[in-house]
Amino acid sequence: MTKEQVEKHGEVIKWFCDNADKGVWRKVKEWELIYRPIFDVSTIYVKNDEFAEYRKAEADGKQIQYRLYNRREWRDCSVDDRIFTQQGAKEYRIKPDFKGGDWVVCKKCNTKHQLTSKDGCSLDSIFCTGCETTLFREDIEMWTPVDEELCIFVDEDKEEYFLAKYNRSSEYLEDIGDYYFNELDWDFVFPIEHIKNLK
Ligand SMILES: [Zn+2]
């Protein structure tokens, strides 16, 4: 075992010494559970403990969240053994890509859809009225405003709102007046279709 290997995989190696029967997950192209790891420096390994699902997801670039004491909300966290030893695996989740209320765009026809909270949790499929097909996770992406797009800007309490064009560059804003905004000026930006939700 080299110094590099210990630096890179020390935590996993230490764990594996006590839990060799459980194996470790190795990622080359796909994840695979192995029982005789060589702990190659250029390969990713994670412990096959009760948090393995989250360890793999984080290594794949996903955000992990833990449940707050109020039981309802989730907060972003990193896969940290100090946290993981105190709480059970059900106190964690992989952060959902979308949540209820988010505006998403159909990649096939550009129609915007606002997800219900049910869609946000499961997101099995939604029906697109634009191209009249059923959309799956890979068919949609998060709506983001583009320059010159007419948007609704809303304050933190969702009481005040303003209809204006979007402009990404705040330096540019000063020259052209108050009728262009971006995320820095208001708490929320919605597409114009959101108008039906406003009282
Ligand atoms: Zn569509």
Image: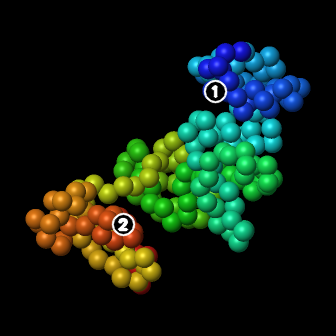
Quickly name the residue at label 1: 7
Mark 1 and mark 2 lie on one chain; the one further toward the N terminus is 1
> Residue 82 vs residue 137: left or right?
right
Question: Residue drawn 29% across and 77% down?
Answer: 162
Dot 2, crowdedness within 10 Å: few (<14), some or many (≥20)? many
Quarter location, residue 61: top right
Quadrant in which the N terminus appears: top right
Estimate the x, y position of residue 25 in percent, counting from the top left: 73, 28
Circle 2: element type? strand
Question: Residue drawn 58% across and 47% down?
Answer: 63
From this viewpoint, is residue 125 visible?
A: no
Quadrant in which the C terminus appears: bottom left
Quickly name the residue at label 2: 189
Q: CA distance from mark 1 to mark 2?
A: 44 Å
Towards the viewer: 70 or 162: 70
From this viewpoint, is residue 53 visible?
A: yes
Estimate the x, y position of residue 6 in percent, counting from the top left: 68, 24
Towards the viewer: 119 or 148: 148
Q: Amino acid at mark 1?
A: Glu
Counting every numbered tag in the picture gives: 2
Q: Which residue ends up furthest to the left in the rendered image? A: 175
Q: Label for residue 72?
A: none
Question: Residue drawn 14% across and 66% down?
Answer: 174
Q: Which residue ends up furthest to the front in the rendered image? A: 3
Q: Amino acid at mark 2?
A: Val
Q: Nearer the viewer, mark 1 or mark 2?
A: 1
Estimate the x, y position of residue 154 in percent, counting from the top left: 37, 75
User: Do residues under tags 1 and 2 come within 8 Å of each other at their CB atoms?
Assistant: no
